[in-house]
Image: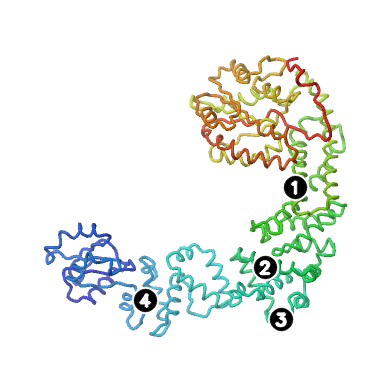
Amino acid sequence: MDIALIQSYIAFKSPSPRPLLVLIDRSQILSIDGILNILDRNFLIVPYENDLQIRDVIEKYKDNMQDKRFCIVTSKENDENLYIADYIARSNLIEITPQNLLEFSQNGFNWLDNVNQLQGADFWDNIDRLKKFRESISSRISSTECNSIIISALLNLDLLKPLLPTSAIELQRKIDRDERIAELRKKYPKLIEFLEQKVHEAIPLMAKIGTDEELTKFIWLAYSLSQHTENYEILLPRILGDDIWQKYGEIPQDRAKEICEQLIESDSDRTLEQIKLVEEWLGQDEEKMRLFKSWLGVSSGNIAKAVEYSVKERCFCAPLKDSLRTIARAMVSSSVSMAVAPQMKDEILKNITKRHLFLQDDTGYMRIRDTFDEFSLLCEFLNLVSEIKKKEWWNSRNRLDNIDLWIQDIYPKYISRLEFLRDRIETLNFKCELLLPALMQKLIDEVRQILANLNESFTDLIQRHYPLWVTEVEKPRPILTVDFISKVFLPLYNRYIKSDDQSAYIIIFDGMRWDEWDFLKPSILQTFHGKLAMEDVIPMLSILPSTTEWARNAIFAGKFPKDFHSADESELLESALNSYQVAKVQISGEFPGQRDNMMRFLEEKAQIKAVVFSLIDIKIHSTMQNLITLYEEVQVNFNNTIQPYLQKIPSNSLVFILSDHGFVELTGKGIIAPDRSQADPHR
């Protein structure tokens, strides 16, 4: 605040000031405390905030106003100043506004009350720029000029000069993105509306494109075609019709491109709505759509044209879907996939995963995002199959006789991902039909054959080595689930649990195999985000038989079924840990629908807590759906019923998340041998 300017202005307005001044300050540009020195007389500033406050403050002045000078500062309207009407009658009443101060300090230049909307620091921080811009205009100004000066000062740019289209486009980007302008919009909405109007006037087509559907069709069709083909002006009249072409055909290509790219940059919602309008209009006339696609070269099945279009097209969806279908069907049906250069495939994926405008659209329009997802997954699937067939272990079964290779490489990187991709692609293909049914079946059959070959090799390995692992003839053996307590749990427990107020949680998801862990892992890590750090992921092999009752009890017992005789999981765990002098152990099954029981379990004091969740195993045994649908249902159940409990685990805890066994999909009929009801797990 320029206190000297304020004092000079008050002295000018009141050359013989009374002991009481009342200053009307609706722009709130005055300080609400301190002292004003007017003609060598000091006036204490008394702000008028509310009736009670003003009464208490000036009570001491009312009977002795000759000896104590003060000034009341109010930002209220006249009808709100009734409480101090008596003081106003006995005072010098002066209105302090930006307009008054500017005209007082800038002799000969008039201002309009538009400038009075500036508040506090916005006025004082920009007063010098306001004066500078004002001096560039003659002594009389219009309302438009006054607003231009205010905006110019606030943004520190000259809007008094004609705004060129390129500058207007840049300013529009700033309006959409700049945080400073966003703040000004809240305080001075009319000023920003004025600024936007000024920008639109500099880009007349920009304003018109939102209201003129014919112009919208011309602009976006011209823009799309210009990205892919030359001499597109020959085609446009045939698609648009003579009337639209005669109205807008003379708009330069660069101008249309400039407008579209500015809209893409600054207003994505408006852009998507306009493209939908154009594409839906095209779709209503088969001949127009045929001409459009034919000119682009995407309706002929030409792989090279389809690839070229899929790399570049960021706007339209229908022709891009056709292009992706052409490429996908060629890749699956034959070795034509080799004709799509890897770098071109990467460019297509970059376009449909990062650049295309409809990645921002969540309305399900034309299922374009599903199409993008399926194509991306299909590329990953084909790359994975190709990679498998190049592996030495695929071409030499002797190399598959290595359990470490299976644990560290084949299963987590290939088998698990291959099944997931197959089912995900199949699910998406029902929605967007990227592949014909026969090609989808070919893909499924190829996965089935790969998995059958690998399963056969793995079965041979287990038959040869499992008896040697169990009897410890072959050392070191891979980590089996019976080794969890001794080889995984206890080393980490002794390392991290240092006080009685800490607990270790053993959380078993019954039937969770590796790919289900990959599916749930983001949600699980999000549950503990910022609370727990993931130490490691440790592959384990289930014991045989892997039936839940035997496999899970073996985890808690730390022994094979033949070495224990209890079915009580709590008793087995306590017995296993007894020799390690571990404190109180608490074990629980899950409590569906019994929130209080589960909360008591979490809150009870115990150094080791174990809980089992069976939702995956239950779904596996009852579902008739594919893996993706199964996993999505498990995800929903996890979010609703399990995640809330896991979030209650204290941040100083040690958490183990594990599974007792996995599962495989069987085709056709099968039998359980031996009959579990007659089998003795302890033999």
Q: Secondary structure at mark 2?
A: helix
Dot 2 and dot 1 residues touching (CB under 8 Å) = no
Relative depth, front residue between 29 and 612: 612
Distance CA(mark 2)–CA(mark 1): 29 Å
Amino acid type, callout 2: Leu
Residue occupying the point 20% across, 57% down:
56
Q: Secondary structure at mark 3?
A: helix
Q: CA distance from mark 3 to mark 1?
A: 45 Å
The residue lying toward the viewer, choosing from 529 and 590, is 590
- Using the image, tell me which numbered label, if any, was put on residue 277: 2
Q: Give the answer, above or below, for where 88 lies relative to 611.
A: below
Estimate the spatial distance between the alpha carbons at disc 4 and disc 3, rounded to whole Å: 48 Å
Which three-letter amino acid code belongs to the residue tagged 1?
A: Thr
For marks 3 and 1, the one nearer the N-term is 3
Residue 21 horizontal side relative to residue 592, left or right:
left
Q: Tell me which numbered mark, 2 or 1, is placed earlier along the sequence.
A: 2
Q: Quadrant of residue 54?
A: bottom left
Q: Can the viewer see residue 231?
A: no
Tell me the tag on residue 427: 1
- The residue sitting at 76% across, 14% down in the picture is 683
- According to the picture, the residue beneath numbered tag 4 turns out to be 113
Q: Nearer the viewer, mark 4 or mark 3?
A: 3
Disc 2 or 4, which lies upstream in sequence? 4
Image quadrant assignment for residue 47: bottom left
At horizontal 41% and vertical 73% (from top left) the residue drawn is 129
Q: Position of residue 541 (x, y in %)?
A: 73, 28
The amino acid type of the residue labelled 3 equals Asp
Q: Position of residue 569 (x, y in %)?
A: 63, 20
